[in-house]
Every structure is written in C-alpha cells, then in structure tokens.
Image (spheres, rainbow, N blue to C red):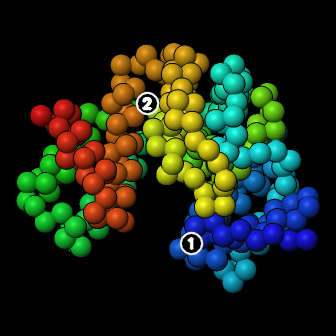
Amino acid sequence: MEQKIKIGFNNEIIINQDSLKKVCYNLNRRENFLREVDFYLNRHYDFMPKLYEYNTDCNNMYIIIEKIKGYNLFTVWSTLSVSDRQQVLIALKKICNELHKIRSKENYQYIYLAEFDKYLSIILENNIIPNDNSIQCLLEMREYIKSHFYMHTCFQIHGDLQFNNVIYVNNDCLKLVDFEHIEFAPIEKEIYSIFRMADDPYSFINKDNNVIIDNMAFQSIKSIICQLAPDIYNNKYFNYNLFLFEYLNSMRWIAKYPKYDKYRNVLFNKSKKFVR
C-alpha cells in the first residue's frame, strides 16, 4: 500500500513498505535534485539510506531510496530524557565528523557575497525596503562582510541539518536524509541550521506531524553542542560567523516574505553592533 505526502511545493514522497520514492515536480528545484542524486552516487556512508533507483529526466525526476525504520528525531526529541538527548547529539556529532572529513579550498566569501547580492537585487527591484536609510544599512553590512568575513576551511556539510532530516533509530544510531542542500561551507553554517531550529522549533513542525514541543528540550540543544564542540564554540569568530548566516537567511526570507518583522529586526537592529 502506498502513502503519498506533499513536501512543500517542490517534492512528493511516496512511501512503500521498504522504500521511499521522492518525486521532484518543481523544475526550479532541479539543481537541488541533481545535487542529491550526485551525493547518493558518490558518497557511501553508514548513516545514509541506500539508493535503489533514480531518474533525472525533467519530465519524471525521482529517486527511490531505502526506507529507514525509525522515527523523525524532531517528533521524539521532547520525549527523550536529558541523558538520552546528550547521547543522541554525541551520535549526531560523529556523523557530522564523517561528513566534515571532506574539505574544500573554495573562497566562501565570494559564494556568500554572491548570494547576498542575489537577495539584495530582489529587495531593490521589488521596492521591498523603500527607506533609503535601511537600504544604506544593507549596503554597509555588505561592505563590512566583504572586509571582515573570517575565512577558514570549508567542509562538506549537510546544509539543512534540522531534526526533521534526522531519523532516530536509537540513542546511538541515527540516519540522515534529504541531501539536496549538501555543500561546502564553514562549519558554523551547519551549526546555524540546528540553532535556528532550537530557537524556534514551532516553525519546523510539519503539517503531518502530531508533536508536542518542549521548549526547554530544544533550548538545551545549544548548550549540549557547545559542550561537545568546544574548539568551535570557543573560537573568537564563532558568534560573528553564526550571525552572518542568520543575516543571510534573513535576507532570503525578507525577499520572499517582505512583511516578516522577525527578519527585519536581524537586518536593521541586530546588525548595528557589527557596522557601527
């Protein structure tokens, strides 16, 4: 018996007894789809499902992968004990360590600024922020990033490492899914994905998920990760780089949802301490 689930406006998941068929019906997402196919073809980790079949034809794009027997980590996180959460994040760190073994010498500053400029163009062309002072604030932040972005090694990261993309088998066994955002970037970008979920778990609830959120359980994620990765957390550039990814994400959402005040606060209030 098949079960069909819509995933946003881009994909559909068809679930069978032993496999999942992910169908990409939005051609604008073809690049992401091909990135995921490439990852399955060229990477073989114990923490990823097996790839059974794929098709990259624009008229029928899909992958068929192994169905992992487990639970969406997001839905069970609030039910875990304090010690279980610690153990789960230790297991997740081991997975990330495997991913991060592959490195790149790409200059991420150029990648970051290119994405920044893409959203800036959308904002300007659509008159989303008509205030001249606000536009000047964006331009000043761009110049600040250009001259201060701390460059360091780029690692292979999942790119969307929030708990809906983690399958919980048990405390010591996790699996990752949804590799369409796999990329090379500073590790802080990986951590930012998790911290954003920890700060606002309600925005990550899928409409098909019947889940109760324990805010304290999600807030604890940040302190546990900082304990598990002291070398990253204690780096003097950690909070600054983390904010840069928050800023870029805010630009992306403002370009898409112009009236979302939460992201305006990041662009025009939180950023002031960096550019003043």
In the picture of the structure, the residue carrying the numbered disc 2 is 152
Residue at x 19% of width, y 47% of height: 268
Query: Left of 230 or right of it: where is 86?
Result: right
- Report the amino acid beneath label 1: Phe
Residue occupying image coordinates x 71% and y 60%: 37
Q: Residue at x 61, y 61 (%)?
A: 207
Observer-nearest of 120 and 270:
270
Q: Which residue is mark 1?
A: 9
* Foreground residue among 6 and 276: 6
- Which image quarter holds the N terminus? bottom right
Instruction: Tell me: 65 left or right of 196.
Output: right
Residue 192 horizontal/vertical position (percent): 47, 38
Along the horizontal axis of the image, is 245 left or right of 153? Answer: left
Residue at the extreme bottom: 59
Q: Quadrant of residue 85?
A: top right
For residue 135, which quarter of the picture? bottom left
Is the residue marked by circle 2 packed among few (<14), some (14-19), or many (20+) residues within 10 Å?
A: some
Q: Nearer the viewer, mark 2 or mark 1?
A: 1
Q: Position of residue 173 (x, y in %)?
A: 80, 33
